[in-house]
Image (cartoon, rainbow, N blue to C red):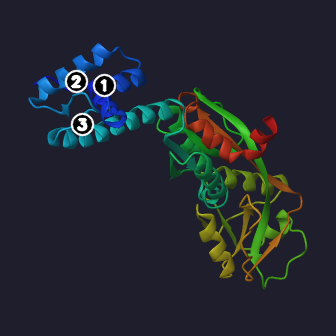
């Protein structure tokens, strides 16, 4: 038997729904003889009668009723497949690979992913914990679509970087320490420090801050996980210089009473940016970008 035609199935279902070949022909914008030929070909291929055609409405045979039910499912699956392709081409579905640090994943991504799910639930975001250097390398290699990185970044071919937000770097220290209102490099250099590891942009940023004041910092421990660093601060293990990360909504988490936060003097800032692969800038990636910077796109609209 030759393969079934979706057009033939659609004609059969239309006859069953509308009650006659003539009504089906009008609804499908086909000539009446074409509908007759399609049903005859379909019955010939199946080797059985599907419809009883007489002076009254067309009636499905027992064989026809079962086959029409299957035909409806086949047509629905075909329509879903076509719609899925259209949505993918329009960027409304698909997978976006995002790289970010642990701090960004914990504080910046959740509200963005919530906005994305509300407006584009068909987009799946795969989040990978990466340093900025690793993210830039993977973007260039094509194994990542988008990343939140610390700025500045050296130019990388095929990767476009734009500023996202600026965050103040502050000191987190055990609450029982006696400390001035604003902390200087000289004061902090004399205390045990917990810092991000040397491969991160934040480590270089803070090391440069100490060096500009003529002092050298020697961290007690290097750890590339900000929440773990704050846990060690709360336990009295040392002080840490970390971004004062915002959750991007009105519901900020309660402060740990074991941790005191002090501004730095001179002030220190971390600039974050969005890095996008030229190959992944279209499609669903653009909707993830909009979710990460809603104010920018709202004002542009």
Seen at 50% across and 29% down, the residue is 89
Q: Residue at x 41, y 18 (%)?
A: 29
Question: Please, is residue 230 above or below residue 22 in the view?
Answer: below
Side of 180 relative to 222 (left or right): right
Count the marks: 3
Q: Which residue is mark 1?
A: 21
Q: Which mark is residue 58?
A: none
- The answer to whether the residue labelled 3 contacts the one labelled 1, judged by CB atoms less than 8 Å apart, is no
Task: Measuring from the top left, give residue 199's x and y in whole percent.
Answer: 59, 51
In the depicted structure, whether residue 154 falls above or below residue 149: above
Mark before the other along the chain sequence, 3 or 2: 2
Reading the image, the residue beneath label 2 is 39
Question: In the figure, is residue 122 to the left or right of 174?
Answer: left
Q: Secondary structure at mark 2?
A: helix
Quarter assignment of residue 255: bottom right
Q: Report whether 186 appears left or right of 259.
A: right
Q: Are there few (<14), some (14-19), or many (20+) residues within 10 Å of tag 3?
A: some
């Amino acid at each position: 038997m030759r393969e079934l035609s979706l057009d033939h199935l659609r004609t059969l279902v239309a006859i069953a729904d509308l009650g006659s070949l003539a009504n089906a022909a009008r609804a499908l914008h086909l000539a009446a003889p074409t509908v007759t030929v399609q049903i005859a070909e379909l019955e010939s291929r199946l080797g059985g009668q599907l419809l009883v055609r007489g002076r009254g409405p067309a009636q499905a045979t027992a064989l026809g009723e079962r086959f029409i039910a299957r035909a409806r499912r086949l047509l629905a699956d075909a329509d879903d497949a076509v719609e899925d392709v259209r949505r993918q081409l329009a960027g409304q579905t698909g997978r976006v690979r995002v790289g970010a640090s642990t701090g960004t994943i914990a504080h910046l991504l959740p509200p963005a992913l919530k906005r994305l799910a509300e407006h584009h639930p068909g987009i799946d975001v795969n989040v990978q914990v990466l340093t900025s250097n690793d993210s830039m390398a993977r973007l260039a290699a094509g194994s990542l679509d988008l990343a939140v990185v610390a700025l500045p970044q050296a130019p990388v071919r095929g990767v476009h970087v734009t500023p996202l937000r600026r965050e103040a770097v502050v000191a987190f220290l055990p609450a029982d320490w006696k400390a001035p209102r604003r902390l200087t490099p000289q004061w902090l250099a004399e205390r045990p420090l917990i810092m991000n590891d040397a491969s991160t942009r934040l480590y270089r940023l803070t090391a440069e801050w100490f060096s500009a004041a003529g002092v050298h910092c020697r961290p007690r421990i290097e750890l590339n996980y900000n929440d773990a660093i704050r846990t060690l601060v709360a336990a009295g293990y040392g002080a840490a210089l970390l971004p004062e990360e915002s959750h991007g909504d009105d519901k900020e988490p309660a402060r740990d009473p074991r941790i005191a936060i002090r501004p730095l003097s001179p002030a220190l800032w971390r600039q974050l940016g969005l890095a996008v692969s030229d190959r992944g800038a279209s499609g669903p990636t653009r909707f993830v970008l909009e979710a990460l910077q809603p104010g920018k796109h709202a004002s542009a609209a």
